[in-house]
Protein backbone atom coordinates (compact mmCIF):
# COMPACT_ATOMS: atom_id res chain seq x y z
CA UNK A 1 0.00 0.00 0.00
CA UNK A 2 1.37 3.43 -0.88
CA UNK A 3 1.43 6.43 1.35
CA UNK A 4 -1.98 8.09 1.33
CA UNK A 5 -0.39 11.39 0.40
CA UNK A 6 0.69 9.84 -2.89
CA UNK A 7 -2.68 8.31 -3.58
CA UNK A 8 -4.81 11.34 -2.86
CA UNK A 9 -3.03 14.70 -2.68
CA UNK A 10 -4.54 17.39 -0.55
CA UNK A 11 -6.99 19.73 -2.16
CA UNK A 12 -5.16 23.00 -3.00
CA UNK A 13 -8.42 24.98 -3.26
CA UNK A 14 -9.17 24.92 0.48
CA UNK A 15 -7.62 27.52 2.77
CA UNK A 16 -5.44 26.51 5.74
CA UNK A 17 -6.73 28.92 8.37
CA UNK A 18 -7.27 26.85 11.54
CA UNK A 19 -4.40 26.56 14.06
CA UNK A 20 -4.10 24.57 17.29
CA UNK A 21 -6.18 27.01 19.33
CA UNK A 22 -8.92 27.16 16.72
CA UNK A 23 -8.88 23.38 16.20
CA UNK A 24 -9.11 22.68 19.92
CA UNK A 25 -11.87 25.28 20.22
CA UNK A 26 -13.87 23.62 17.45
CA UNK A 27 -13.51 20.23 19.14
CA UNK A 28 -14.47 21.54 22.56
CA UNK A 29 -17.55 23.46 21.49
CA UNK A 30 -18.57 20.35 19.56
CA UNK A 31 -18.17 18.23 22.71
CA UNK A 32 -19.68 20.71 25.17
CA UNK A 33 -22.97 21.40 23.48
CA UNK A 34 -26.31 20.95 25.16
CA UNK A 35 -25.32 17.34 25.94
CA UNK A 36 -23.89 17.56 29.48
CA UNK A 37 -26.63 19.97 30.53
CA UNK A 38 -29.61 17.99 29.28
CA UNK A 39 -28.40 14.42 29.83
CA UNK A 40 -27.57 14.55 33.55
CA UNK A 41 -31.05 13.35 34.56
CA UNK A 42 -30.92 10.63 31.89
CA UNK A 43 -27.62 9.20 33.18
CA UNK A 44 -28.67 9.43 36.84
CA UNK A 45 -31.95 7.68 36.02
CA UNK A 46 -30.14 4.96 34.07
CA UNK A 47 -27.86 4.15 37.02
CA UNK A 48 -30.42 4.90 39.74
CA UNK A 49 -28.26 7.23 41.80
CA UNK A 50 -25.04 9.28 42.00
CA UNK A 51 -23.03 6.19 41.04
CA UNK A 52 -23.83 7.52 37.58
CA UNK A 53 -20.49 9.29 37.87
CA UNK A 54 -19.04 5.95 36.71
CA UNK A 55 -20.67 6.62 33.34
CA UNK A 56 -18.81 9.91 32.93
CA UNK A 57 -15.48 8.51 34.17
CA UNK A 58 -15.59 5.41 31.97
CA UNK A 59 -16.84 7.57 29.10
CA UNK A 60 -13.71 9.71 29.44
CA UNK A 61 -11.47 6.61 29.47
CA UNK A 62 -13.03 5.21 26.31
CA UNK A 63 -12.98 8.64 24.65
CA UNK A 64 -9.22 8.90 25.30
CA UNK A 65 -8.63 5.38 23.95
CA UNK A 66 -10.64 6.06 20.81
CA UNK A 67 -9.11 9.54 20.59
CA UNK A 68 -5.69 7.92 20.15
CA UNK A 69 -7.11 5.95 17.21
CA UNK A 70 -8.19 9.22 15.63
CA UNK A 71 -4.94 10.96 16.55
CA UNK A 72 -2.71 8.35 14.89
CA UNK A 73 -4.84 8.13 11.76
CA UNK A 74 -5.27 11.91 11.57
CA UNK A 75 -1.51 12.51 11.81
CA UNK A 76 -0.72 9.80 9.24
CA UNK A 77 -3.43 10.96 6.78
CA UNK A 78 -3.89 14.68 7.49
CA UNK A 79 -6.47 15.54 4.85
CA UNK A 80 -10.15 16.47 4.89
CA UNK A 81 -12.75 13.76 5.28
CA UNK A 82 -11.77 12.12 8.56
CA UNK A 83 -13.02 8.54 8.70
CA UNK A 84 -13.82 8.53 4.99
CA UNK A 85 -10.17 9.04 4.16
CA UNK A 86 -8.90 6.63 6.82
CA UNK A 87 -11.23 3.75 5.93
CA UNK A 88 -10.53 4.13 2.22
CA UNK A 89 -6.77 3.88 2.67
CA UNK A 90 -6.85 1.15 5.34
CA UNK A 91 -8.95 -1.31 3.37
CA UNK A 92 -7.73 -0.41 -0.13
CA UNK A 93 -8.85 2.72 -2.03
CA UNK A 94 -10.06 0.79 -5.09
CA UNK A 95 -11.29 -2.41 -3.47
CA UNK A 96 -12.98 -3.08 -0.13
CA UNK A 97 -11.95 0.34 1.15
CA UNK A 98 -13.95 2.00 -1.59
CA UNK A 99 -17.14 0.30 -0.43
CA UNK A 100 -16.49 0.79 3.29
CA UNK A 101 -15.66 4.46 2.85
CA UNK A 102 -18.81 4.94 0.75
CA UNK A 103 -20.87 3.27 3.49
CA UNK A 104 -19.29 5.60 6.05
CA UNK A 105 -20.38 8.67 4.11
CA UNK A 106 -23.78 7.09 3.53
CA UNK A 107 -24.38 6.55 7.26
CA UNK A 108 -23.03 10.04 7.95
CA UNK A 109 -25.86 11.45 5.88
CA UNK A 110 -28.13 10.04 8.63
CA UNK A 111 -26.01 10.21 11.80
CA UNK A 112 -24.52 13.69 11.25
CA UNK A 113 -27.95 15.34 10.92
CA UNK A 114 -29.05 13.45 14.06
CA UNK A 115 -26.04 14.85 15.91
CA UNK A 116 -26.67 18.38 14.68
CA UNK A 117 -30.37 18.11 15.49
CA UNK A 118 -29.66 16.91 19.04
CA UNK A 119 -27.89 20.18 19.87
CA UNK A 120 -30.62 22.23 18.27
CA UNK A 121 -33.36 20.27 20.07
CA UNK A 122 -31.51 20.77 23.35
CA UNK A 123 -31.28 24.50 22.75
CA UNK A 124 -34.98 24.70 21.96
CA UNK A 125 -35.73 22.65 25.07
CA UNK A 126 -33.93 25.11 27.30
CA UNK A 127 -35.63 27.98 25.49
CA UNK A 128 -38.93 26.55 26.73
CA UNK A 129 -37.77 27.46 30.25
CA UNK A 130 -38.46 31.05 29.18
CA UNK A 131 -41.46 30.21 26.97
CA UNK A 132 -43.19 27.04 28.29
CA UNK A 133 -45.76 26.95 25.43
CA UNK A 134 -42.91 25.88 23.13
CA UNK A 135 -43.27 22.35 24.54
CA UNK A 136 -46.87 22.08 23.40
CA UNK A 137 -47.28 19.45 20.67
CA UNK A 138 -49.46 20.25 17.68
CA UNK A 139 -49.14 16.88 15.93
CA UNK A 140 -47.79 13.52 17.09
CA UNK A 141 -47.60 10.35 15.02
CA UNK A 142 -45.94 6.91 15.14
CA UNK A 143 -44.81 4.88 12.15
CA UNK A 144 -43.94 1.19 12.29
CA UNK A 145 -42.87 -1.49 9.84
CA UNK A 146 -42.21 -5.20 10.45
CA UNK A 147 -39.05 -6.30 8.71
CA UNK A 148 -37.99 -9.87 7.88
CA UNK A 149 -35.43 -11.19 10.40
CA UNK A 150 -35.10 -7.80 12.14
CA UNK A 151 -38.55 -7.44 13.69
CA UNK A 152 -40.54 -4.25 14.24
CA UNK A 153 -39.02 -0.93 13.16
CA UNK A 154 -40.68 2.01 14.94
CA UNK A 155 -40.30 5.76 14.52
CA UNK A 156 -42.22 8.41 16.44
CA UNK A 157 -42.30 12.02 15.26
CA UNK A 158 -44.09 15.14 16.38
CA UNK A 159 -44.40 18.85 15.70
CA UNK A 160 -44.20 21.39 18.52
CA UNK A 161 -43.12 24.96 19.00
CA UNK A 162 -39.73 23.69 20.21
CA UNK A 163 -39.20 21.58 17.08
CA UNK A 164 -39.98 24.57 14.85
CA UNK A 165 -37.53 26.70 16.86
CA UNK A 166 -34.89 23.98 16.49
CA UNK A 167 -35.33 24.10 12.72
CA UNK A 168 -34.95 27.89 12.74
CA UNK A 169 -31.71 27.54 14.73
CA UNK A 170 -30.26 25.20 12.11
CA UNK A 171 -31.23 27.62 9.37
CA UNK A 172 -29.46 30.47 11.17
CA UNK A 173 -26.36 28.30 11.64
CA UNK A 174 -26.21 27.50 7.93
CA UNK A 175 -26.38 31.23 7.24
CA UNK A 176 -23.40 31.90 9.55
CA UNK A 177 -21.34 29.11 7.98
CA UNK A 178 -22.02 30.34 4.48
CA UNK A 179 -18.68 32.18 4.34
CA UNK A 180 -14.88 31.82 4.12
CA UNK A 181 -13.20 29.48 6.67
CA UNK A 182 -10.82 32.19 7.95
CA UNK A 183 -13.84 34.15 9.16
CA UNK A 184 -15.21 31.08 10.92
CA UNK A 185 -12.11 30.32 13.02
CA UNK A 186 -12.53 33.45 15.13
CA UNK A 187 -16.23 32.62 15.58
CA UNK A 188 -15.30 29.29 17.17
CA UNK A 189 -13.02 31.02 19.68
CA UNK A 190 -15.72 33.58 20.47
CA UNK A 191 -18.32 30.86 21.01
CA UNK A 192 -15.91 28.84 23.17
CA UNK A 193 -15.54 31.83 25.49
CA UNK A 194 -19.24 31.61 26.33
CA UNK A 195 -19.03 27.82 26.72
CA UNK A 196 -16.14 28.00 29.19
CA UNK A 197 -17.78 30.85 31.10
CA UNK A 198 -20.91 28.73 31.56
CA UNK A 199 -19.04 25.70 32.88
CA UNK A 200 -16.76 27.84 35.02
CA UNK A 201 -19.73 29.51 36.71
CA UNK A 202 -21.47 26.17 37.31
CA UNK A 203 -18.33 24.70 38.89
CA UNK A 204 -17.76 27.78 41.06
CA UNK A 205 -21.36 27.80 42.24
CA UNK A 206 -21.29 24.08 42.94
CA UNK A 207 -18.00 24.12 44.85
CA UNK A 208 -19.05 27.04 47.05
CA UNK A 209 -22.43 25.41 47.86
CA UNK A 210 -21.38 21.77 47.78
CA UNK A 211 -22.96 19.14 50.04
CA UNK A 212 -21.01 15.89 50.09
CA UNK A 213 -23.82 14.07 51.88
CA UNK A 214 -26.19 15.00 49.05
CA UNK A 215 -23.74 14.29 46.21
CA UNK A 216 -22.76 10.85 47.52
CA UNK A 217 -26.03 9.62 49.00
CA UNK A 218 -25.83 6.26 47.26
CA UNK A 219 -28.90 4.01 47.35
CA UNK A 220 -28.63 0.50 48.83
CA UNK A 221 -26.61 -1.94 46.70
CA UNK A 222 -25.57 0.87 44.37
CA UNK A 223 -22.36 -0.93 43.41
CA UNK A 224 -23.64 -4.51 43.47
CA UNK A 225 -22.43 -6.08 40.20
CA UNK A 226 -25.83 -7.42 39.17
CA UNK A 227 -27.44 -7.77 35.76
CA UNK A 228 -29.43 -4.56 36.38
CA UNK A 229 -26.23 -2.71 37.30
CA UNK A 230 -24.57 -3.54 33.99
CA UNK A 231 -27.74 -2.74 32.01
CA UNK A 232 -27.83 0.67 33.71
CA UNK A 233 -24.12 1.20 33.12
CA UNK A 234 -24.53 0.38 29.44
CA UNK A 235 -27.32 2.95 29.09
CA UNK A 236 -25.30 5.53 31.04
CA UNK A 237 -22.23 4.96 28.88
CA UNK A 238 -24.29 5.34 25.71
CA UNK A 239 -25.33 8.79 26.90
CA UNK A 240 -21.83 9.72 28.10
CA UNK A 241 -20.43 8.61 24.72
CA UNK A 242 -22.79 11.11 23.14
CA UNK A 243 -21.64 13.81 25.58
CA UNK A 244 -17.95 13.25 24.82
CA UNK A 245 -18.16 12.80 21.07
CA UNK A 246 -16.80 15.65 19.02
CA UNK A 247 -13.12 15.30 19.95
CA UNK A 248 -12.47 14.20 16.36
CA UNK A 249 -14.18 17.14 14.66
CA UNK A 250 -10.89 18.65 13.48
CA UNK A 251 -10.16 15.47 11.50
CA UNK A 252 -12.93 16.32 9.06
CA UNK A 253 -11.35 19.65 8.05
CA UNK A 254 -7.72 18.50 7.78
CA UNK A 255 -7.10 20.39 4.55
CA UNK A 256 -8.05 23.63 6.32
CA UNK A 257 -5.75 23.07 9.35
CA UNK A 258 -2.26 24.53 9.63
CA UNK A 259 0.47 21.89 10.16
CA UNK A 260 -2.19 19.16 10.36
CA UNK A 261 0.17 16.26 11.20
CA UNK A 262 0.95 17.97 14.53
CA UNK A 263 -2.19 20.01 15.11
CA UNK A 264 -4.77 17.24 14.64
CA UNK A 265 -3.49 14.77 17.30
CA UNK A 266 -2.73 17.57 19.77
CA UNK A 267 -6.18 19.11 19.37
CA UNK A 268 -7.90 15.73 19.79
CA UNK A 269 -6.10 14.64 22.96
CA UNK A 270 -6.06 18.10 24.52
CA UNK A 271 -9.80 18.58 24.03
CA UNK A 272 -10.58 15.15 25.58
CA UNK A 273 -8.39 15.85 28.61
CA UNK A 274 -9.86 19.29 29.24
CA UNK A 275 -13.49 18.34 28.67
CA UNK A 276 -13.20 15.10 30.67
CA UNK A 277 -11.95 16.99 33.73
CA UNK A 278 -14.65 19.64 33.34
CA UNK A 279 -17.44 17.07 32.99
CA UNK A 280 -16.55 15.05 36.07
CA UNK A 281 -16.10 18.11 38.30
CA UNK A 282 -19.22 19.84 36.96
CA UNK A 283 -21.50 16.86 37.40
CA UNK A 284 -20.31 16.16 40.94
CA UNK A 285 -20.96 19.82 41.76
CA UNK A 286 -24.50 19.61 40.39
CA UNK A 287 -25.22 16.41 42.36
CA UNK A 288 -24.04 18.26 45.46
CA UNK A 289 -26.80 20.86 45.06
CA UNK A 290 -29.72 19.15 43.28
CA UNK A 291 -30.70 15.80 44.89
CA UNK A 292 -30.41 12.89 42.50
CA UNK A 293 -33.83 11.64 43.62
CA UNK A 294 -35.34 14.82 42.23
CA UNK A 295 -33.67 14.27 38.88
CA UNK A 296 -35.01 10.72 38.66
CA UNK A 297 -38.54 11.80 39.58
CA UNK A 298 -38.61 14.75 37.19
CA UNK A 299 -37.05 12.92 34.26
CA UNK A 300 -40.20 11.10 33.03
CA UNK A 301 -42.11 14.40 32.76
CA UNK A 302 -39.33 16.12 30.88
CA UNK A 303 -38.78 18.80 33.51
CA UNK A 304 -35.33 17.38 34.22
CA UNK A 305 -34.05 19.07 31.09
CA UNK A 306 -33.89 22.29 33.14
CA UNK A 307 -31.48 20.86 35.69
CA UNK A 308 -28.97 23.72 35.27
CA UNK A 309 -31.75 26.28 35.64
CA UNK A 310 -32.95 24.54 38.82
CA UNK A 311 -29.35 24.31 40.06
CA UNK A 312 -28.76 28.05 39.72
CA UNK A 313 -32.16 28.96 41.10
CA UNK A 314 -31.46 26.96 44.26
CA UNK A 315 -28.20 28.83 44.82
CA UNK A 316 -28.75 32.40 43.62
CA UNK A 317 -32.41 32.80 42.72
CA UNK A 318 -34.46 33.41 39.54
CA UNK A 319 -32.07 35.91 37.96
CA UNK A 320 -29.26 33.33 37.98
CA UNK A 321 -31.55 30.66 36.58
CA UNK A 322 -32.45 32.95 33.69
CA UNK A 323 -28.83 33.83 33.00
CA UNK A 324 -27.68 30.21 33.21
CA UNK A 325 -30.44 29.13 30.85
CA UNK A 326 -29.26 31.70 28.33
CA UNK A 327 -25.67 30.51 28.64
CA UNK A 328 -26.68 26.88 28.13
CA UNK A 329 -28.50 27.94 24.98
CA UNK A 330 -25.25 29.64 23.91
CA UNK A 331 -23.26 26.42 24.36
CA UNK A 332 -25.87 24.41 22.48
CA UNK A 333 -25.71 26.80 19.55
CA UNK A 334 -21.90 26.63 19.59
CA UNK A 335 -22.15 22.85 19.26
CA UNK A 336 -24.56 23.02 16.33
CA UNK A 337 -22.19 25.50 14.67
CA UNK A 338 -19.13 23.26 15.09
CA UNK A 339 -20.90 20.04 14.08
CA UNK A 340 -22.34 21.43 10.87
CA UNK A 341 -18.99 22.93 9.93
CA UNK A 342 -17.05 19.70 10.39
CA UNK A 343 -19.51 17.23 8.93
CA UNK A 344 -20.21 19.29 5.82
CA UNK A 345 -16.62 18.61 4.68
CA UNK A 346 -16.98 14.82 4.63
CA UNK A 347 -19.40 14.27 1.70
CA UNK A 348 -17.39 16.94 -0.11
CA UNK A 349 -14.16 14.95 0.28
CA UNK A 350 -15.87 11.72 -0.82
CA UNK A 351 -17.47 13.33 -3.87
CA UNK A 352 -14.16 14.91 -4.82
CA UNK A 353 -12.70 11.42 -4.76
CA UNK A 354 -15.45 10.14 -7.06
CA UNK A 355 -16.93 7.91 -4.36
CA UNK A 356 -20.12 9.85 -3.63
CA UNK A 357 -22.69 11.88 -5.52
CA UNK A 358 -20.82 14.44 -7.63
CA UNK A 359 -22.95 17.42 -6.61
CA UNK A 360 -21.40 17.38 -3.14
CA UNK A 361 -17.97 18.25 -4.60
CA UNK A 362 -18.97 21.79 -5.56
CA UNK A 363 -17.14 24.67 -3.89
CA UNK A 364 -18.57 28.14 -3.50
CA UNK A 365 -17.03 30.12 -6.41
CA UNK A 366 -16.00 33.05 -4.20
CA UNK A 367 -15.51 31.84 -0.62
CA UNK A 368 -14.23 28.32 -1.45
CA UNK A 369 -16.33 26.16 0.90
CA UNK A 370 -18.48 23.08 0.05
CA UNK A 371 -21.84 24.83 -0.04
CA UNK A 372 -23.88 21.93 -1.50
CA UNK A 373 -22.78 19.60 1.28
CA UNK A 374 -23.47 22.29 3.88
CA UNK A 375 -26.99 22.94 2.60
CA UNK A 376 -27.85 19.23 2.23
CA UNK A 377 -26.81 18.31 5.79
CA UNK A 378 -28.54 21.39 7.16
CA UNK A 379 -31.81 20.45 5.47
CA UNK A 380 -31.64 16.83 6.71
CA UNK A 381 -30.84 17.98 10.25
CA UNK A 382 -33.92 20.19 10.14
CA UNK A 383 -36.09 17.14 9.40
CA UNK A 384 -34.53 15.26 12.35
CA UNK A 385 -35.81 18.00 14.67
CA UNK A 386 -39.24 16.34 14.51
CA UNK A 387 -37.90 13.41 16.59
CA UNK A 388 -37.56 13.22 20.39
CA UNK A 389 -34.18 13.97 21.97
CA UNK A 390 -33.87 10.52 23.59
CA UNK A 391 -34.53 8.75 20.28
CA UNK A 392 -32.09 11.03 18.45
CA UNK A 393 -29.27 10.32 20.92
CA UNK A 394 -29.77 6.55 21.00
CA UNK A 395 -30.06 6.19 17.22
CA UNK A 396 -27.06 8.46 16.64
CA UNK A 397 -24.74 6.59 18.98
CA UNK A 398 -25.67 3.08 17.81
CA UNK A 399 -25.49 3.93 14.10
CA UNK A 400 -22.13 5.63 14.53
CA UNK A 401 -20.64 2.81 16.60
CA UNK A 402 -21.74 0.04 14.23
CA UNK A 403 -20.91 1.71 10.93
CA UNK A 404 -17.91 3.85 11.84
CA UNK A 405 -16.13 3.58 15.18
CA UNK A 406 -15.80 -0.20 15.37
CA UNK A 407 -14.63 -0.52 11.76
CA UNK A 408 -12.14 2.32 12.26
CA UNK A 409 -10.65 1.01 15.53
CA UNK A 410 -10.16 -2.42 13.95
CA UNK A 411 -8.80 -0.68 10.87
CA UNK A 412 -5.97 1.00 12.78
CA UNK A 413 -4.67 -2.45 13.77
CA UNK A 414 -5.09 -3.67 10.18
CA UNK A 415 -3.13 -0.66 8.90
CA UNK A 416 -0.28 -1.31 11.36
CA UNK A 417 -0.01 -4.88 10.04
CA UNK A 418 -0.42 -4.10 6.33
CA UNK A 419 1.64 -0.92 6.15
CA UNK A 420 4.12 -0.71 9.04
CA UNK A 421 6.37 1.70 7.09
CA UNK A 422 3.68 4.40 6.76
CA UNK A 423 4.97 7.65 8.32
CA UNK A 424 3.19 8.18 11.65
CA UNK A 425 4.00 11.55 13.23
CA UNK A 426 1.90 10.42 16.21
CA UNK A 427 1.90 6.79 17.36
CA UNK A 428 -0.70 5.40 19.76
CA UNK A 429 0.63 5.04 23.28
CA UNK A 430 0.72 1.43 24.61
CA UNK A 431 -0.41 0.06 21.25
CA UNK A 432 -2.65 -1.91 20.73
CA UNK A 433 -4.26 -1.64 24.19
CA UNK A 434 -6.20 1.63 23.59
CA UNK A 435 -7.69 0.33 20.32
CA UNK A 436 -8.72 -2.97 21.95
CA UNK A 437 -10.23 -1.14 24.96
CA UNK A 438 -12.19 1.16 22.63
CA UNK A 439 -13.55 -1.83 20.67
CA UNK A 440 -14.64 -3.64 23.86
CA UNK A 441 -16.26 -0.46 25.19
CA UNK A 442 -18.25 0.08 22.01
CA UNK A 443 -19.49 -3.51 22.00
CA UNK A 444 -20.54 -3.19 25.65
CA UNK A 445 -22.56 -0.05 24.86
CA UNK A 446 -24.28 -1.78 21.94
CA UNK A 447 -25.61 -4.80 23.79
CA UNK A 448 -25.72 -3.89 27.51
CA UNK A 449 -28.96 -1.93 27.38
CA UNK A 450 -32.65 -2.66 27.68
CA UNK A 451 -34.33 -3.00 24.27
CA UNK A 452 -30.94 -2.62 22.58
CA UNK A 453 -32.23 -4.13 19.32
CA UNK A 454 -34.37 -1.07 18.60
CA UNK A 455 -31.52 1.15 17.41
CA UNK A 456 -29.58 -1.79 15.94
CA UNK A 457 -32.49 -2.26 13.55
CA UNK A 458 -32.09 1.35 12.39
CA UNK A 459 -28.38 0.84 11.73
CA UNK A 460 -28.99 -2.44 9.90
CA UNK A 461 -31.58 -0.87 7.59
CA UNK A 462 -29.17 2.00 6.80
CA UNK A 463 -26.38 -0.50 6.13
CA UNK A 464 -28.48 -2.65 3.78
CA UNK A 465 -29.79 0.40 1.91
CA UNK A 466 -26.23 1.71 1.56
CA UNK A 467 -25.02 -1.60 0.18
CA UNK A 468 -27.79 -1.58 -2.42
CA UNK A 469 -26.96 1.98 -3.50
CA UNK A 470 -23.25 1.19 -3.65
CA UNK A 471 -23.78 -1.93 -5.76
CA UNK A 472 -25.97 -0.01 -8.20
CA UNK A 473 -23.28 2.67 -8.53
CA UNK A 474 -20.59 0.00 -8.89
CA UNK A 475 -22.57 -1.69 -11.67
CA UNK A 476 -23.15 1.60 -13.52
CA UNK A 477 -19.53 2.80 -13.11
CA UNK A 478 -17.97 -0.67 -13.57
CA UNK A 479 -16.24 -0.45 -10.16
CA UNK A 480 -15.24 -3.01 -7.53
CA UNK A 481 -16.58 -5.62 -6.93
CA UNK A 482 -18.90 -5.84 -9.94
CA UNK A 483 -16.90 -4.20 -12.72
CA UNK A 484 -13.26 -4.28 -13.71
CA UNK A 485 -10.68 -4.41 -10.95
CA UNK A 486 -8.42 -1.41 -10.41
CA UNK A 487 -4.71 -1.18 -10.00
CA UNK A 488 -3.77 -0.05 -6.49
CA UNK A 489 -0.65 1.64 -7.77
CA UNK A 490 -2.07 3.90 -10.47
CA UNK A 491 -5.78 3.83 -9.78
CA UNK A 492 -6.39 2.83 -13.42
CA UNK A 493 -8.38 -0.10 -14.83
CA UNK A 494 -6.46 -3.37 -14.93
CA UNK A 495 -6.91 -6.24 -17.36
CA UNK A 496 -5.61 -8.83 -14.86
Image: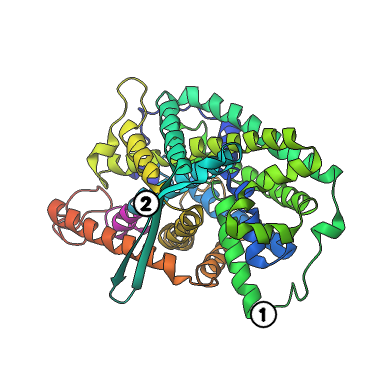
**N-terminal label among 2 and 1:** 2
- In the rendered image, residue 402, in percent from the top left (x then y), is placed at 43, 63
Q: Is residue 271 left or right of residue 152?
A: right
Q: Is residue 93 magenta?
A: yes
Indicate left or right for 119 with 47 as reference.
left
Residue in front for this viewpoint, 252 or 299: 299
Measure how far apart labels 2 and 1 are at the Cα level: 35 Å
Question: Crowding near pointer 2: few (<14 within 10 Å), some, many (20+)?
Answer: many
The image shows residue 202 at horizontal and vertical percentages of: 74, 41
Residue 425 visible in image: yes
Residue in the picture at 72% in, 51% down: 283
**x, y percent for residue 286:** 75, 50
Q: Secondary structure at mark 1?
A: loop
Q: Quadrant of the C terminus?
A: bottom left
Residue at the (53%, 72%) spot, across then down: 450
- Given residues 154 and 107, the one toward you in this image is 154
**Going 49% across and 35% down the picture, which residue do you hit?**
337
Residue beneath disc 2: 110
Q: Quadrant of residue 175?
A: top left
Q: Which residue in the rendered view is the most extreme toward the bottom?
A: 226
Report x, y in % for residue 226: 67, 80
* Location of residue 399 by image quarter: bottom left
Q: Residue at x 43, y 52 (%)?
A: 387
Looking at the image, residue 308 lies above or below residue 405: above
Q: Looking at the rendering, in which quadrant would you find the N terminus? A: bottom left
Q: Which mark is residue 226?
A: 1
Q: Which residues are magenta?
A: 89-105
Q: Residues within 10 Å of mark 1 (few under 14, many from 20)?
A: few
Amino acid sequence: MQSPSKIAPQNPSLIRGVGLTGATSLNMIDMIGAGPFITIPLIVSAMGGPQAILGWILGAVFAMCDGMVWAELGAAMPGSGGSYRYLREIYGPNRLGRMISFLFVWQLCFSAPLSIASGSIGLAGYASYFWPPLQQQFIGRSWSLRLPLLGLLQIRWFISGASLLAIAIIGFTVLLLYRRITRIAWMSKFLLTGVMATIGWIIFAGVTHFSASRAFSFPPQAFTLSHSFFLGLGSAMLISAYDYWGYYNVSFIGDEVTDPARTIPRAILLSILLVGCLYVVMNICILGVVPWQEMVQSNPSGNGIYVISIFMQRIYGPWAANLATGLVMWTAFASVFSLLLGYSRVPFAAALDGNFFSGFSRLHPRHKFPYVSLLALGATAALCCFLSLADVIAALVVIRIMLQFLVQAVGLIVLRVRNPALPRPFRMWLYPAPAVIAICGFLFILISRRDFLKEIRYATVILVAGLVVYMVRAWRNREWPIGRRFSLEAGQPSNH
